[in-house]
């Protein structure tokens, strides 16, 4: 058996063509001079950015690390040739160190390694016959980004990475955007931060230098913090309410309320340890909420002590009339629907005997009393049951429970409305 291969004849260049072109282009070439024949004109850098990942964002130190690369295009008028003169050569590659490339520094880097510049010695610059130059510098860029932790852990941060053409004015080098939006085709998501926006823009500094800005909006993925921080805080608030349902005779009320107070203090410490020790540009609203919860819990401890004082106060001490009136009102409101109206003969009555009143419980003695009209007694008065200190304790528990419940609801509703309504502004 035999095989027949059909080969299409095409124009192609060989290594000698590339060597010749390489030598011809670098003959008399000065890599320290821009490639404009008219040096009074600007070299236009056409730019777009490909973001690969957000490596990390540490709000404690304000350090952002991203990985990506630029596609930068400009025209070097010295690097032109007739393709037909070199056997159809359509492009050629030079090492970055052998040709002119713009010196662009990271303007707001963290400064650990000095001024960081775009590009490395191993990078290549690709040229085309019309002088078009393609350069793709990429790196991990570590920059400073001050965090606004006001909405933590539902915060979204705006960060910008600044690139400055070092040693060149706006009359010599200008940026022009091929596309403003970052290309995310190669992007790998970060587990802690969601990339919501990424775009390029330019800004003139003192009208003499144009800088390139890479703007990113990062939103914290809050599911972990909701489960490990927000839900336990809410559970502690509910448990705070239950202290008033414990029987006072158990002797556990004080210990229970103090334990909850300490637990809230622990969560306040955890939240503070994960936030920068700074009040600028704003203070964390979560820390404010935890502080309020701690104050509420402190009040619960105080309320518990006051309530126990009422419960165990000796009944030999008369309940003041004003306190008794308030307690009676509270207990009647709470229990009115569940109590049946006592009949005339079940009430404590006052009977006048020789002008002196005396009390009897239960049945009436065989004494004449006035007739009743419409089921209401007209000849004697049935006073309310005497309020004891135990009744005052029960009434205080009701008041303290309602107060704590309202404080709990207001605290949590205010927090969730705030974090879901407030939006951060874009950088200007």
Image (spheres, rainbow, N blue to C red):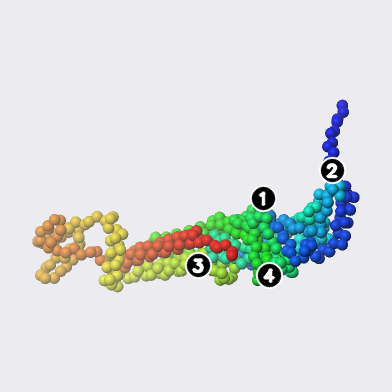
Instruction: Give whichever of discs 1 and 3 has the lower sequence position.
Output: 1
Mark 1 lies on a secondary structure that is loop
Q: Position of residue 361 (x, y in %)?
A: 20, 62
Q: Which numbered marker is on residue 208?
A: 4
The mark lying in front, picked from 4 and 3, is: 4
Mark 2 lies on a secondary structure that is loop
The residue that mark 1 highlights is 185
Q: Position of residue 345 (x, y in %)?
A: 17, 58
Mark 3 packing: few (<14 Cα in 10 Å), some, or many (20+)? some
Viewed as shown, does residue 228 lie left or right of 44? left
Mark 2 packing: few (<14 Cα in 10 Å), some, or many (20+)? few
Quadrant of the rendered image containing residue 270: bottom right
Q: State the CA–CA distance, disc 2 to disc 3.
A: 74 Å
Instruction: Give whichever of discs 1 and 4 has the lower sequence position.
Output: 1
The residue that mark 3 highlights is 288
Mark 1 packing: few (<14 Cα in 10 Å), some, or many (20+)? few
Q: State the CA–CA distance, disc 1 to disc 4.
A: 35 Å
Viewed as shown, does residue 402 lie left or right of 385? right
The mark lying in front, picked from 2 and 3, is: 2
Mark 4 packing: few (<14 Cα in 10 Å), some, or many (20+)? few
Quadrant of the rendered image containing residue 316: bottom left
Instruction: Give whichever of discs 2 and 1 has the lower sequence position.
Output: 2
The residue that mark 2 highlights is 11
């Amino acid at each position: 058996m035999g095989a027949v291969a059909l080969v299409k004849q095409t124009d192609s260049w060989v290594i000698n063509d590339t060597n010749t072109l390489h030598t011809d282009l670098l003959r008399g070439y000065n890599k320290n001079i821009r490639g404009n024949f008219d040096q009074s004109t600007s070299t236009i850098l056409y730019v777009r950015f490909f973001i690969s990942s957000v490596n990390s964002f540490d709000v404690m130190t304000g350090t952002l690390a991203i990985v990506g690369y630029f596609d930068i295009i400009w025209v070097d008028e010295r690097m032109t040739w007739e393709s037909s003169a070199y056997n159809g050569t359509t492009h050629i590659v030079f090492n970055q160190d052998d040709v002119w490339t713009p010196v662009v520094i990271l303007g707001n880097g963290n400064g650990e390694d000095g001024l960081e510049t775009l590009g490395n010695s191993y990078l290549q610059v690709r040229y085309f016959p019309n002088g078009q130059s393609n350069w793709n510098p990429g790196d991990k860029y570590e920059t400073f980004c001050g965090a606004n932790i006001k909405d933590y852990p539902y915060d979204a941060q705006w960060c910008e990475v600044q690139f400055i053409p070092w040693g060149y004015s706006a009359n010599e080098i200008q940026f022009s955007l091929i596309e403003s939006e970052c290309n995310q085709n190669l992007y790998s998501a970060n587990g802690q931060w969601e990339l919501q926006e990424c775009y390029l823009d330019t800004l003139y500094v003192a009208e003499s230098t144009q800088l390139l800005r890479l703007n990113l909006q990062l939103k914290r993925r809050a599911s972990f913090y909701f489960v490990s921080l927000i839900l336990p805080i809410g559970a502690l608030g509910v448990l705070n309410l239950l202290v008033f349902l414990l029987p006072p005779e158990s002797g556990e009320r004080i210990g229970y309320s103090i334990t909850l107070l300490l637990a809230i203090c622990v969560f306040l410490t955890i939240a503070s340890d994960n936030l920068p020790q700074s009040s600028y540009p704003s203070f964390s609203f979560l820390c404010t909420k935890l502080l309020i919860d701690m104050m509420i819990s402190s009040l619960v401890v105080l309320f518990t002590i006051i309530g126990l004082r009422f419960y165990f106060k000796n009944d030999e001490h008369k309940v003041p009339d004003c306190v008794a009136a308030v307690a009676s009102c509270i207990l009647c409101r709470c229990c009115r629907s569940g109590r049946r109206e006592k009949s005339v003969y079940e009430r404590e009555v006052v009977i006048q005997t020789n002008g002196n009143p005396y009390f009897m419980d239960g049945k009436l003695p065989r004494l004449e009393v006035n007739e009743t009209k419409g089921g209401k007694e007209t000849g004697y008065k049935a006073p309310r049951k005497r309020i004891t200190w135990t009744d005052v304790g029960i009434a205080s528990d009701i008041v303290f429970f309602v107060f704590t419940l309202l404080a709990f609801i207001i605290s949590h509703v205010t927090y969730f409305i705030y974090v879901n309504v407030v939006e951060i502004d874009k950088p200007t």
